[in-house]
Image: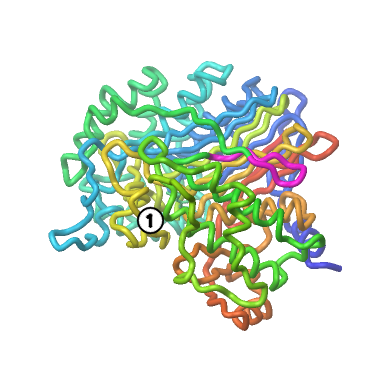
Amino acid sequence: MNKHLLSGLAMLLLTVVIISSCKERDYEIIEGRGITGINGMVVSAHPEASRIGTAILLDGGNAFDAAAAVAFALAVSYPAAGNLGGGSLMVIRDAEGNYSSLDCREKAPGLASRDMYLDESGNVIEGMSTGTLAASAVPGSVEGILELHSRFGILPLTKVIQPAINLARKGFSITAKQAESLNHARNRFIQRNDHPVPFVKDETWCEGDTLIQEDLARTLERICDYGRDGFYGGITADLIVAEMKKGNGLISHDDLDNYEAVWREPVIGTYGAYRIISMPPPSSGGIALMQLLGIMEEMLPEEPVFQSPEEVHLITEAERRVYADRSYYLGDPDYINIPVDELVSKEYLQERMSDFNPEKASLSEDISHGAIPAWEGEETTHFSVVDKDRNAIAFTTTLNSGYGNCIVVEGAGFLLNNEMDDFSSKPAYPNIYGLIGGEANSVQAGKRMLSSMTPTIIEKDQKLYMVLGSPGGSTIITSVFQTILNVIEYGMNMQEAVDAARFHHQWMPDLIYFEEKGADTLLIQKLEMMGHKTRLRSSIGRVDAIRILPEGSMEAGADPRGDDTACAF
Ligand code: DON
């Protein structure tokens, strides 16, 4: 019996499928991993958020109402990454097959400047772009969620926010993983806040403890009552600016007032019979994914073998080159000129892989970005929602690191992002994900920092086929890419594809990372014999995905690396 079949069986046995006994309007709500559903499905990082989104679908809301409700609910139930104080990227496909993408990525404040993280000698000031108020960029998520809802939602805004308000005010039981994560961040919360924050209590956190966030409930109420002005203006804006003034924060009333989410044309490509719709810049995700799939289309063998040394080697060499391009060419399209069509063209990708040696690893120091003539130039969260009409949304949202910079806006109850670290503080200086960048991603007032977030939708025969995305910093692109290959090339179902062990190479550092759990020693040995350097790490990505089966039902892939849960009916 092959290893996928075995893992599939194990998954079936292990998956806890809770069939909720309550029947609502004749629909049975199912909850768990690897589940299937017909009328609607939400897969997110927290069971409370998945339940809230599903309840909105049951109440007659569409996928976009549900996504707005899930995003607000994650800001409460999953404070490590769900947010009001961060940014988000979304890819949307409506039931008629129209696509769009919404960029509500944070922007550098008006007072930000190229060398703001350097000392007088030109050295990067350790921790300034991650652990201080100066790490925070102008938040975009609230504007984006409201924009999504007003353009595509059909329920009133109150309906989609109220569940999050209730959750914040009444509290919810934290999971074992959350208790561990809050205890781990305890000292950072204490050191970086001069006021009590709900994430710290006298004793350590335990599974099942209740987390209540009264200030956050009031901020959500202001958004509910006044829309964007409830966050970017009025009391909330005053509280944000007051917080900035306690230290080296730069966000001003003008920055908040002027923030705008931008509808952008998604990056669209094909892979065999599939059409891939993904996030354009300021994310690198869509372009990198198209490049990786473009290379695979030409170079994977007819009968691919999951994680054979030859294929891991090929994928690694493709990732090495694609991440080198990312570092050089990609940044905010409103500030730089990005040669998108060239980067994803067949000819360019062929040329890029022309020095590929099937038996030997190349060295990252010998690989630079490709030549394009005349060119000038651990914590995020993803959720996927599909409704009964097959409206679909892939939604990735982030504060950057877990709990952002760990600073809670006093009186407003939400955490601030440390997204400024996604800029390149200095050419060739690695950010927290080890990514290096250059001029294209330098800090500039009003600019959006380059992201790896890759919310993606796939069509087959012009019908909705898959919705997916992942957190994981630089490993997001790899996680989305490998999950797609797992289904299309390696014949896995959605949950198996999400469960399968992942590996990652990002050009610099010159290492293939393998997940500790599921690392295949023999495979690693063979790759090392080819000249690859390898390292183990705890986990890579957390993919939450939905696939539409040929007969029309949906199957969930909820990542077991977290508390990720699917809900469907
Ligand atoms: O936008 C980005 O690429 C990063 N700020 C994402 C951060 C992330 O995924 C952290 N998650 N584990």
- The kind of residue tagged 1 is Gly
Residue occupying the far front of the picture = 374
**Which of 227/408 is in front?**
227
Q: Image height check: is 531 above or below 236?
A: below
Residue at position x 30%, y 57% in the image = 188
Q: Is residue 431 visible?
A: yes
Local packing at callout 1 (Cα closer than 10 Å; few below 14, some 14-19, many 20+) is many
Residue 268 position within the rendered picture, expressed as x and y whole percent measured from the top left:
62, 38
Q: Is residue 142 left or right of residue 512?
A: left
To which residue does mark 1 refer? Answer: 437
Vertical placement of residue 534 versus 270, above or below: below
Could you tell me residue 282's position as x and y percent?
44, 41
- Left or right: 556 as drawn, with respect to 105: right
| Res. 200 in view | no
Rendered-image quadrant of the C terminus: top right
Q: Number of labelled discs?
A: 1
Question: What residue lies at 48% left-to-right and 34% top-to-bottom?
Answer: 167
Taking the image as shown, residue 332 lies to the left or right of residue 565, namely left
Q: Residue furthest left?
A: 120
- Whether ligand 1 has any atom under 8 Å from the Cβ at mark 1 is answered as no
Comparing 162 with 480, the one in front is 480
Residue 304 lies, in percent from the top left, at 78, 62
Q: Say if the magenta span includes residue 248.
A: no
Q: What secondary structure is found at the residue carrying circle 1? A: loop
Looking at the rendering, in which quadrant would you find the N terminus? Answer: bottom right
**Magenta residues, dominant SS class:** strand
The stretch of residues the image draws in magenta is 269-279
Nearest the camera: 411 or 108?
A: 108
Residue positioned 55% across, 52% down in the render: 477
Image color mode: rainbow
Residue 231 vertical placement versus 452 (above, below)? above
